[in-house]
Amino acid sequence: MVSSALLRARFLAVLLAALVVATPLAIAPPAAEAAVKKPLDIVTIHYDPAGKDYSKNSLYVKEYIQVKNTGTKTLTLTGYVLRDNGPQKFAFPKGTKIAPGKTLTIRSGKGTNTSSTLYWNKSSYIWNNTGDTARLYNAKSTLLESCKYKGGVHKATKTTVRTTATTAYC
C-alpha cells in the first residue's frame, strides 16, 4: 500500500514537470503573431527636388513618395492613407490596386492618375527639406509603417532612415 505522502509527492512532481513544459509555451507568442509582415512598404521619399523651391506645379510633381507591395497578392488600397508629420493627408483613390512586387509613386502636385503614378493634387510641397515623417495606414487605420528622415546627407540611425541630399530611403 502506497502512503498518501508518497502519492502527494508524485502528484507534485508531475505537476511541476507539466508547468516547466507549459510555461514557455504560454509566454511565447504564436509564430504567426511573432513575424507580422507589412503588405505595403514605404521605400523612397524624394523630398528635395533639384533647383529652388518655387511655387509651381511643374516643381511640386518632382517631389514624391513611393510605396511597394511586398506581398504575394495584389492589394486594393481603397481606404489606405499616407500622412506627413503635419496636417497633410493623402487618401488612395477608391479602387487603386498594386500588384505584388510593384512600386506606386505618389507625387505632391497636380496631375492625371495612372496605374503607376498618383497625384496628391496639392498646390504646395508636402515633404519638408529639413526632415519629416511619413506614415502609412491601412484601411482599418492601423499604422503599417513610419519613416522618419532628416534633411541632407545622413546615415541611418535607430530613429531616422538613411538620406542623400534629396532622398530618404525607408
Image (cartoon, rainbow, N blue to C red):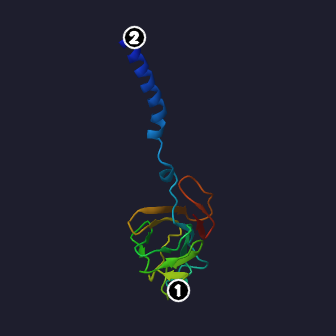
**Which amino acid is tagged 2?**
Met
Q: Is residue 165 left or right of residue 40?
A: right
Find the distance from the CA under tag 1 to the CA under tag 2.
Answer: 85 Å
**Mark number, residue 162:** none
Which badge, 1 or 2, is on the more N-terminal residue? 2
125 or 76, nearer to the observer? 76
For label 1, the crowd category at 10 Å Cα-Cα, with few meaning under 14, some 14 to 19 and many 20 or more, is: few
Residue marked by disc 2: 1
- Residue 125 image point, x, y percent: 48, 77
Residue marked by disc 1: 114
- Residue 157 image point, x, y percent: 58, 54
* Above-or-below relation of 44 to 160: below
* Above-or-below relation of 30 to 79: above
- How many numbered markers are drawn? 2
Q: Which residue lies most toward the bottom here?
A: 112
- Residue 117 image point, x, y percent: 54, 82
Residue at image coords 46%, 67%: 136
* Above-or-below relation of 110 to 139: below
